[in-house]
Image: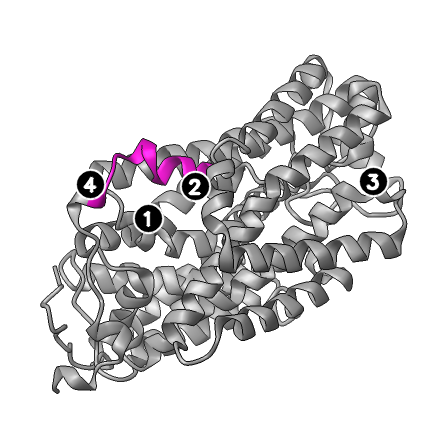
Amino acid sequence: MSNGTLPSYLSMAKPNPSTNRAPWYKNTAPTYAGIFLWFVFWSQAPSGGSGVPGGVLSQGVGVALLGLVVAALLCHFLFYYVPGLLGLKTGLPLYVVGTSTYGTQGGFLMPGFLMGVLQFGWLGVNAFFSAQALSPLVGGNPMAVKVLMVLWAALAAFVGLKGIQYVAKVATYLPLIPVAILVILLAKTLGGIGSFDAQKFVGAAAAGGQGGGLSFLGVMALSMTFVIGFFATAGAAGVDFGTNSKDEKDVQMGGLMGIALAAIVSAGAAILIAAGAFGKTGTYAMNPADTAFMGNIMGSAGAGKTMGLLLAIAAFPSACFSSFIAANSFKTTMPKINPFITVGLGAIVSIILAVTGLAGKAGAVFTVIGASFGPICGAMMVDYLLSGGKWSGPRKGWNMAGWISWAVGFVVGIAPLVNIANIPAAPLVAFIVGAVLYFVLAKAGLQPEVVPLPSGDKV
């Protein structure tokens, strides 16, 4: 097969040179940590993104933190580490590296294009929760809040297309805002943690007719569903992060500090705040970023509103980055279409998700994300191992081992959301299914031949 038959995004791909790379503490770790400091993540930590009474605190603080630690380590070792190594060793971005697992033709859609499409889901989530945080500015008027959602998503999409370099300069310091708020809230509630009673906590919710709490295994499964589902796309994006790493130590440390530790610290603080607040006041609350909750803790409604406003401001760069990633994906895979059109259409979808409230169902969103990228990360890991710990290079046409493993893994991952089956820790199970199926199908000969890149950019 001649190089001329390769798609242009492959034939023109160039690795990121070593001179452009930096230590983990200058790129990978702070960027990933910023993702986990997004208040939409840690505010959902006590509930696990679900409406189950007691959430992850059903069995007490210790079990809640254990589930979080396990989930955070799984994110690092299963979902990020191999993509990070692939980026390190090739210097090539995800949409190029993914052609090994999905083929030179199939790679057009998976995982690069899918990554771009799902960013608009994140933009919708960002717009929904940020507008809620800003709602005191408009007196909580429902219609005015929806207008804020529209403006938020539209502005973020525009900046993502045109002005991301300006946002990046400010984004370096904005993560300090949620850090400060978490520290303040934790200091205010720390004294109540020793008085926390999980049975009473679940009972306070069940009194509203919500039913009982979760078992030990139920808490562990909910933690994995929530954390892994949130992280799955960022795990595959580890390829792009890896292209900026200098060596394997940078890949490892960037993940351990920026992913595992950051997730444990931010979500762990939120869990402790919810437990401490209940132990101190007896008030059942599952969202530490709620303006009313923060106001009660601070003893001033105005303080809660101010904190909500600050959290929304700190969240705006992540909305812009989502649009930026989507725009880059579309520019690469559909270079002949004006990105204003593709990103504009995506922004409209984000707005619809936000104003209808669908984006506010965090648990459902995380389930979809985990189902979409769980099997991708699993297949990529096995592909890497079968190739001897390196990138094989793009494979001709459609790699059916990758596509079949993804399709089955996606169905498994999405099953709980569409009431097909109640599968615990569905994003993790989707990863396992994708990995196992890829191994079986690859061994069965469903992997097509490797096509060399013109420059030989293959490790």
Q: Is residue 32 magenta?
A: yes
* Res. 32 mark: 2
Determine contact: label 1, label 3, CB under 8 Å: no
Query: Which marked residue is nearer to the observer: mark 3 or mark 4?
Result: 3
Number of other residues with Cα within 10 Å of mark 1, as a class: few under 14, some 14 to 19, many 20 or more: many
Determine contact: label 2, label 1, CB under 8 Å: yes
**Pointer 3 residue:** 137
Indicate whether 1 appears above or below 349.
below
1 or 3: tag closer to the N-terminus? 3
Residue shown at the point (72%, 36%) measured from the top left: 309
Indicate whether 74 appears above or below 328.
above
2 or 4: tag closer to the N-terminus? 2
Residue 134 position, x and y percent, is 77, 42
**Pointer 1 residue:** 241
Which quadrant does the C terminus fall into?
bottom left
Q: Residues under labels 3 and 4: Cα distance?
A: 46 Å
Residue shown at the point (26%, 77%) measured from the top left: 8
Left or right of 286? Residue 225 is: left
Q: Amino acid at mark 2?
A: Tyr
Q: What is the secondary structure assignment of the residue under circle 2?
A: helix
**Pointer 4 residue:** 246
Q: Which residues are magenta?
A: 20-33
* Res. 113 mark: none
Residue 72 position, x and y percent, is 45, 40
Query: Which marked residue is nearer to the observer: mark 3 or mark 2?
Result: 3
Indicate whether 4 appears above or below 19.
below
Residue shown at the point (30%, 62%) measured from the top left: 380
Q: Main secondary structure of the magenta part?
A: helix
4 or 1: tag closer to the N-terminus? 1
Q: What is the secondary structure assignment of the residue under circle 4?
A: loop
Determine contact: label 4, label 1, CB under 8 Å: no
